[in-house]
Amino acid sequence: MVIAYAACAQSGVWIFRDETDSNPGSALYDCVVTNSSRQMMCYSDFSFPRDTPPFIPGKALLKYYQHRYRVEKTEDFAKTGQWRVTVLHEGEETVHVFDAIMPCTGFFSIINYPMYPGQDEFKGTVFHSNEYRGNEHMAGKNVVVVGGSHSAGDISVDASLTAKQVYLSMRKGTWVITRSGPGGWPGDLYMNRRINFLLPEWYRRNAMKKDLLSKINVDNLGLRCDRELFCSEVMVNDLIQSSIFCGKVKTKTGIDHFTKTGIVFTDGTEVDADVVIFATGYKLRAPYLDTSIVQEELKDLELYKYVFPPRLEHATCACIGFMMTIGATVPLSSYSPDGQCSNNYCSIGWIEAVGESWVGVDGRIPPIPYQDSLAAQIGALPSFKRYLFTDPALAFRILFGPALPCSYRLVGPHPWKGARSAIMGVWDIYSNATRTRDVGKPKPNYWPLPLQVAVLLALVALLIFAT
């Protein structure tokens, strides 16, 4: 028998609540849009509807996905491997014992709420970004947004549409990534390719830095990060640059202290403030699990394959979603249960080795090597060699094309008949969702190839005879 306990009736991370209680966990705001494109974040065997836009509004994503408990080992866990789950429902506690558990809440449960000197005396409003819903209450006010990641950028831009002035306060700066990539296609279709992860990390980092800096002048905008890319805050945002250009958002250093009417920053500047919003993320904790099972810091996290606690006497606990990754988490989390574990296989040695080779300074893991390692373990890894002679078009898409979640359903224990067509038709899937007006076939804006060759030969000949 399988029993599921949920803190709410719908998908927790992507739920929109009008009410804002003291600590409801993560919650959506009106303007939220996914940072990863649709085919890079869907389930491996369940694509989005064809008319879904490349980047999905949060409320629309909730339609796709559609804590009052405590988990402890039983007294005889060493012998039975069983767990005691205490559930609080409508004021009544009930206790159940299970042979195995799968905590699937991830980290987004307890807000990270900083305190600064003078904050208690501040006469304005202070709240965490998980209580932000829209910009209606920001009208005509001076707003300070604290943070350097996705929510900080989203809220700064959204609040600036009605606020008198928005200040974005960052201690270390941030790397801004736009959703659009080469040729106007979603950028993650180019970043998340297996061929890229065969290249040295320093090469990938420098190539991406060059691309990012060609789009945004981080010095002029006050955004420059003092840490390397992949080891620091990242902000996926298409509008922060224009908001700063227009003066609606101004970047500032970290907060030094509050005054009764405003904020003093670490560079000594002071601004009046009516509202301060902490977009400072969440503590990496699962409050219903003991810290010996899921630790409180990413650097201390001990989960084999980011799923199984290796120090337990029995492999009867699989933690789903307890990871931070570069890109979409959903495909990684949905594939995690397919991994295998035994007392001998779940080793601390694997965790230490991965800590040196995979994980960045900020604890994020690269999605493709991680998913490939899980897939290889159960025989579901898509192989370039396997299809090179039987289906070369598919083989080249596997290696050089976007590493889509459905590529792990080509072979293995849970194949999906639609996997190949989804891989081969990925570009049409994206364009069909946005091409809602017939524009005909674009006319070539370049010379025909034979003419280009003729001109090139003429120039070469001219150079030879001229010398």
Image: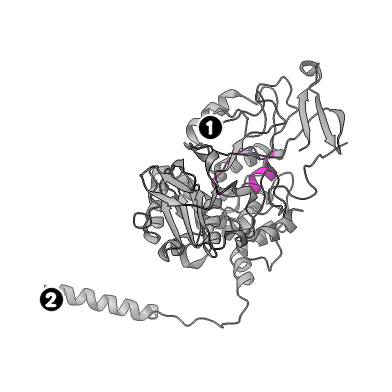
Indicate the amino acid at tag 1: Val
In the picture shown, does residue 409 fall above or below 351? below
User: How far apart are labels 1 and 2 at the CA level?
Assistant: 60 Å
| Magenta segment includes 330 | yes
Sequence-first disc among 1 and 2? 1
Q: How far across and down, in percent of the image, does residue 242 sit? A: 45, 65
> Left of 2 or right of it: where is 360?
left
Of 236 and 186, which appears nearest the observer? Answer: 236
Q: Is residue 189 above or below residue 355?
A: below
List the residue tagged with mark 1.
354
Q: Which residue is mark 2?
A: 466
Q: Quadrant of residue 99?
A: top right
Residue at 65 percent across and 48 percent down: it is: 331
Q: Residue at x 51, y 31 (%)?
A: 355
**Above or below: residue 370 compared with residue 345:** below
Q: Is residue 92 left or right of residue 431?
A: right
Q: Is residue 12 visible?
A: yes
Q: Which label lies toward us, 1 or 2?
A: 1
